[in-house]
Image (cartoon, rainbow, N blue to C red):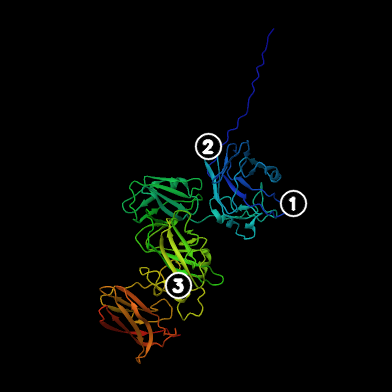
Amino acid sequence: MKIFFLICYVVRATFIFAQAGRNDVIIDELMFDPSPPVVKPFGLPEVEFVELKNVSRAPYNLSGWKLSDASTTATISVNFVLLPDSFVVLCSSSAAPLLSGFGATIGLANFPSLDNDGEMIYIRTKEGKVLHALQYDKSWHRNAVKSEGGWTLEMIDTRFPCSGSTNWKSSVHSLGGTPGKPNSVNAPNPDELSPLITGAYATDSLNILLSFDEPIDSFQASQPGNYFISDNTGIPANALVVPPLFNSVTLQLKTPLIKNKVYKIILRNISDCNGNVNIPGMSAKVGLASAADTFDVVINEILFNPRPEGVDYVEIYNRGNKILDLKDLFVANQSASGTAGVPRQLSASKHLFFPEDYFVLTQTATTVKQQYVSKKPEAFLELNMPSLPDDKGTLILMNRLGKTIDALSYDEKWQFKLIDNNEGVALERVDYNKPTQDAMNWHSASTDAGYGTPTYLNSQYHAAKQVDGLVTISPAVFSPDNNGHEDFVTIHYQFPEPGYTCNITVYDVNGRAARFLCRNAICGIKGYFRWDGLDEKNTRLNIGPYVIVTEVFSLAGKVKKFKHAVILARKLH
């Protein structure tokens, strides 16, 4: 008799999933401000959520994957396979039952709280690889009503997940969003723009951080040979792309940077994650910053009485030879009693301020750019501006230690007397090397310049000339029509010692006194006075020749008289 034995094997099927690469799974919809809901009671529930989409051709098991913001991380603890071209909604454990009817949903313990004003959020694998990250902002809604709540943000074209704000807008679905389903705003929206540098600064003498306006390709950006730094610094030793946003690179140098020396970084072959290569010759300035001290930076232009639909602005100028950090500068107003207001930081992050550069401080940069010519649109800093009264006020620029760098007590009476309406007319500094609190060092921005020159050389700029004689004037012909070209005459004086006083009188061609510029004015060793072509009653004088007579009195009682001819001209209309 034959005996047969039956041996049974139990076989367990094991599925091996591919490892996801960057942007294989993306965040393509998020609800960060669910209140008030668009439809009650059967619309979207009042809960926050993030939707993921698999845009690759492979399935992925999401077990162990993590969703994070700046402070919180939630881990997917269940086995869930996300198939190609499929969606899953991530939310808090308590919100999962409310969202499960809309599509596949996973509830997470410790789900990050999504800030209404915007923040960074990103998804990564259990191995820690970042797949996709967003630095969203409620302005991405592009709709003032929808940005107040109840509507999701949806990605327009999921083929270009790195395009940032240009590839997002509010849902147009009647419920306010499309969790678990294709986005309601789906449309072709190709990214054809090259990445641009938005900032560069040295964290120390051997490390430079470069920032870009969008995520960049990690492989090309990590090649040291794609960067060249001037002044014998050369190619960096290493280039490290910074996760999770991948929009910045740390360059580790071989040679230390010298403080306050301006270097130039030239980039090549840097592409965004959609394959757009940087513009040839793209470069950035960089250097090691120093602390700002008195008069390193000056208040150079101020608009304190804007048009009814306009906003205030203040232009600052780096007149020294130091590289400064805008993060270390603050601005505040001052009450009539002398009490300083709350200091407002110019930049929340490091932002270099190079010698001879301008920056404009304002509440709304877009408004200023619409109303005035701006030759450097990138040189604007938006901040919660201190109040600037329309008639007179005081503005203080200070460093991190509270030391005053510059201060201006302005007055509307400093405006050009023949301007009928000062609304929208900025006051410009005539010479940034002259004292700030000198009324003669300020003049209304010219008509030809549109009454303001934010981010570039003032229309009324006139550097004081070094003079050899005791008293000189410039120019010999001037035209006080506020067009920004020789709008006033400057009377320069220079004496061997202090203690001189002077009288300055302007006479017309008939020898009649037309203007008494000063009487018994105490002079320094050198300085200047200014005549704007008006008489004692601030009335426009006729064109023609005039004589400026300057009488100088010394401590010993000696008198010396200087006469200078000048021609008052005016454009013919």
Q: How many marks?
A: 3
Of labels 3 and 2, the one closer to you: 3
Earlier along the polypeptide chain: callout 1 or callout 2? Answer: 1
- Give the labeled residue for mark 1: 41
Q: Secondary structure at mark 2?
A: loop
Name the kind of residue labelled 1 in the image: Pro
Which is nearer the N-term, disc 3 or disc 1?
1
84 relative to 554 in the view: left or right: right
Mark nearest the camera among 1 and 2 is: 1
Q: Which residue is depicted at the point 61% across and 55% down?
A: 187
Instruction: Indicate whether 118 appears above or below 470.
Output: above
The correct choice, above or below, for 247 with respect to 487 in the image is above
* Camera-nearest residue between 333 and 329: 333
Q: Residue 510's spot in the image, x, y percent? A: 35, 92
Mark 3: which secondary structure?
A: strand
Residue occupying the point 61% across, 41% down: 110
Residue 552: image location, x then y, percent: 29, 81
Q: In the rendered structure, which amino acid carries the disc numbered 2?
A: Glu
